[in-house]
Amino acid sequence: MRSLLPAVLMLLAMVALLAPENARAQSDEEKASAQLQALRSDISRINREISSANKRKNTLQAQLREAELKQSGISRDINRTNKAIANQQSELAELRQEKTSLEQARDQQQSRIAMELRTAWQMGQQGQIKVLLNQESPDTVARVMAYYRYFFRARNELLNEFRETLVALQGTEERIATTLGQLEQRQTDLEKQQQALSRAQQTRHAAVAKLNDSIKGKGAELKKMEADQKELQQLLDAIREAVVNLQVPENYQPFQSAKSKMPWPVPGRASARFGSSRNQGKMKWQGVTIPAPAGTPVKAIHHGRVVYADWLRGMGLLLIIEHGDGFMSLYAHNQTLLRDVGEWVSAETPISTVGDSGGLTKPALYFEVRKKGKPVNPAHWCRR
C-alpha cells in the first residue's frame, strides 16, 4: 500500500492541474472580451473629447467634420448597396441557369411521356386480356405480365418526375421574380444614395472653401498645421495608454519581423516623402503622401487591430491600426472607412478608400508608421 501512495498523490495532483484548464480558457476569453470593450470605451471617450474640443476651437472645422462624416457614411452605404446588387445579380444568373436546366428537363420528360402514351395506345389496341389468352406457355404469360407491371410503374414514375419538375420550375420562376424586385429596389436605393452623396459633396466643398479662406495667411496656415500635429500626437498618446495591455492572437507575427517586406497601402509614387520640408521648411513631413484616384482601396500593411476610425482635424477620415510592440500605422484623408474600432485585420485587407477629406484639394492617402508614438520612415518598413 505504501508503494502505491506516491502514484496516487501524483494522479491527484495531475487532476488538480487539469481540472481548471477549461475555466482558465474561459477566463482568458472573458478577459479578452473585457479588454476589447474597454478599448472601445476608451476610443469613444477620446473621440468625444476631440469632437468637443474641435467645436470649441473652430466652428469651420466642426462644419467640415460633419460634412465629411456624412459623405463617408453615404459612400459606405453605396459600397454596401453595390455589393448587395452584385450578389443579387450573381444569384439571378444562377437562378436563370437553373430555370434553363429545368425547362430542358421538362421538355425531355414531355417527349418521353408522349412516347409512353403512344406505346400505351398500341398496347391498348391489342388488349391485355387478348394478349394473355393468345399465349400458350405459362412462362410467356409471366413475362408478359411482368412487362406490363414494369411499363405502368415506369410511366407513373415518369409522370411524378414531370410534376416535380413543373413545381421546381414554378418555384424558380417565383424566386427570379422576387430577386428582380429586390434588385430593382436596390437600384432605386442606390440612385437616392448617389443623389444624397452629390448633395453631401457640395456641402463639403463649401466647408472646405470657407476653411481655406480663413487660413489664407502663411502664419495662420503654419499655426493650423502645428495645432493639427499637436492634436494627432495627443490622440496617439491617448491610444497608446488605452491599448498598452491589449492581448494579441497566439499566431501573431511581430511587426518588427516583417520589416522591409510589407506592402504599401496603395500603389503609386509618393508626392511628399518622410522627412522632407513642408511649409517653407518650418515643418517636416512625418509620413508620406501617395496620390491616387478617389475610391482606390487602401489596404492594411500588417496584421493588427483597428483602434481609431473617425474624423480628425487636419487628417480628415483617419484610420489607425495598432500592431503590437508599440507599432501603429496611420491612414488619413480617406473617402470611406471600411472597418470599425476593435476589428482585427490582416495584411492587404481593404480598410478604407482614398479620398480628399480633411480639406485636401486632390485625392491622396497620407500614410505614417509610428513606433512608441514617434514617426519612423515608412520606406524602411514597406517593400522597396
Image (cartoon, grey):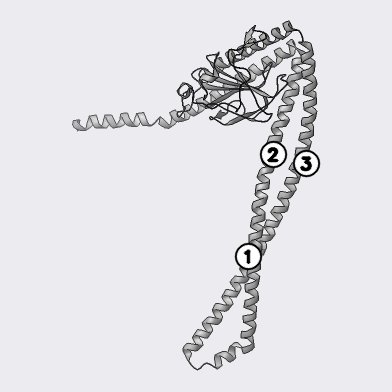
Residue 158, disc? none
- When asked about the image quadrant of residue 21, the answer is top left
Disc 3 marks a residue whose amino acid type is Thr
Residue shown at 35% from the left, 29% from the top: 16
Q: How far apart are the alpha carbons under marks 3 and 1?
A: 36 Å
In the rendered image, residue 123, in percent from the top left (x then y), is placed at 61, 85
- When asked about the image quadrant of residue 131, the answer is bottom right
Which residue corresponds to mark 3? 188
In the rendered image, residue 229, in percent from the top left (x then y), is placed at 64, 11
Disc 2 marks a residue whose amino acid type is Asn
Using the image as rendered, state which of residue 28 and residue 219 is in the foreground: 219
Which residue corresponds to mark 1? 105
**As displayed, is residue 104 above or below residue 248?**
below
Q: How far apart are the alpha carbons under marks 2 and 1?
A: 35 Å
- When asked about the image quadrant of residue 364, the answer is top right
Quadrant into which the N terminus falls: top left
Work out whether mark 3 precedes mark 1 in sequence or the reverse, and give the earlier one.
1
Work out whether mark 2 precedes mark 1 in sequence or the reverse, and give the earlier one.
2
Which residue corresponds to mark 2? 82
Residue shown at 55% from the left, 79% from the top: 149
In the rendered image, residue 339, in percent from the top left (x then y), is placed at 62, 29
| Secondary structure state at the residue bearing disc 1 | helix
| Secondary structure state at the residue bearing disc 2 | helix
Determine whether, in the image, residue 69 is placed left or right of residue 240: right
